[in-house]
Amino acid sequence: MRLPTARLIEIADLAGTFLFAAEGAMAAIRGDLDFFGVMVLSFATAVGGGMMRDVLLGATPPAALRDWRYGAIAFAAGVATFVLYSRAGAIPDWLIVSLDAAGLALFAVAGTEKALSHGMHPFIAVLLGTITGVGGGTIRDVLLVQVPVVLRADIYATAAMAGAVVMVCGRALRWPAPLAAGLGGIVCFGLRMLAVWQHWSLPHASAP
């Protein structure tokens, strides 16, 4: 049975919320924050990008504030990570990177699809999809007093943008929404993981 577009956006948003909340909680624990700090970073990382997108689209109040499930999922993931961190700390770095890449892919396609559903130009939809993917992590890093990953990581925002472009092209070619979203997510996830594996990065300006 084909799912309506709105339902696909919601599923991707909620799944990404859980993954980014857990990742934000791990970052908070590693930053030696207390329980309250872990909850704040879980919520901010999970819903920050989506809230930026919704405000820019004029879809206010943002979905994360109108729908109780976003907050509940974010806090539940934060509590679970806090309680189970003694085990989570033994999780290899590649798995944490994989979860982060999966959250990035889900949010990138969800943000792009929501922008398209609001009648945005495809170029703007790509930008909003990218913002959805990287916004929460940027807020997390600012709260941890770090240079945001999006400004220094090996192909991070670029991966989100690539996935959004693939999705927009698929919709322009009249592919079914699930197919376009799925391929866009795969491209985003695959490019991010490949960049980490191969240590790819964008060019840096050389000091004179």
Image (tube, grey):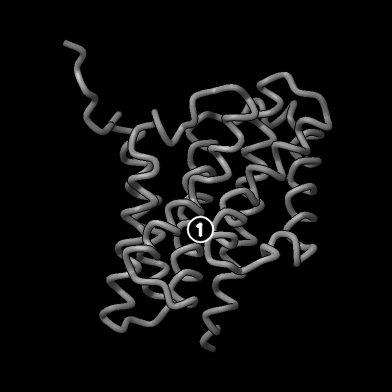
Tag 1 residue: 106
Residue 183 placement (x, y as % from top left):
35, 65
Residue 26 lies in what quarter of the image? top right
Q: Amino acid at mark 1?
A: Leu
**Relative side of 18 to 168, left or right:** right
Residue drawn 45% across the image and 63% down it: 109
Query: Which residue ends up furthest to the bottom in the rendered image?
Result: 1
> Looking at the image, is 106 positioned above or below residue 99?
below
The furthest residue to the left: 208
Quadrant location, the N terminus: bottom right
Q: Quadrant of residue 121?
A: bottom left
Classify residue 24 as left or right of residue 146.
Answer: right
- In the rendered image, residue 11, in percent from the top left (x then y), is placed at 60, 68
Q: Quadrant of the C terminus?
A: top left
Observer-nearest residue: 4 or 44? 44
Q: How busy is the neighbourhood of tag 1: few (under 14 within 10 Å), some, or many (20 plus)? A: many
The secondary structure type at the circle numbered 1 is: helix
Does 160 sit left or right of 208 as displayed?
right
Tell me where residue 71 appears, x and y as whole percent.
77, 54
Locate residue 202, reporting x and y percent. Answer: 25, 33
Foreground pick, 187 / 111: 111
The residue shown at (81%, 40%) is 79
Instruction: Please say if 12 is above or below 23.
Output: below
Quick check: 113 above or below 82? below
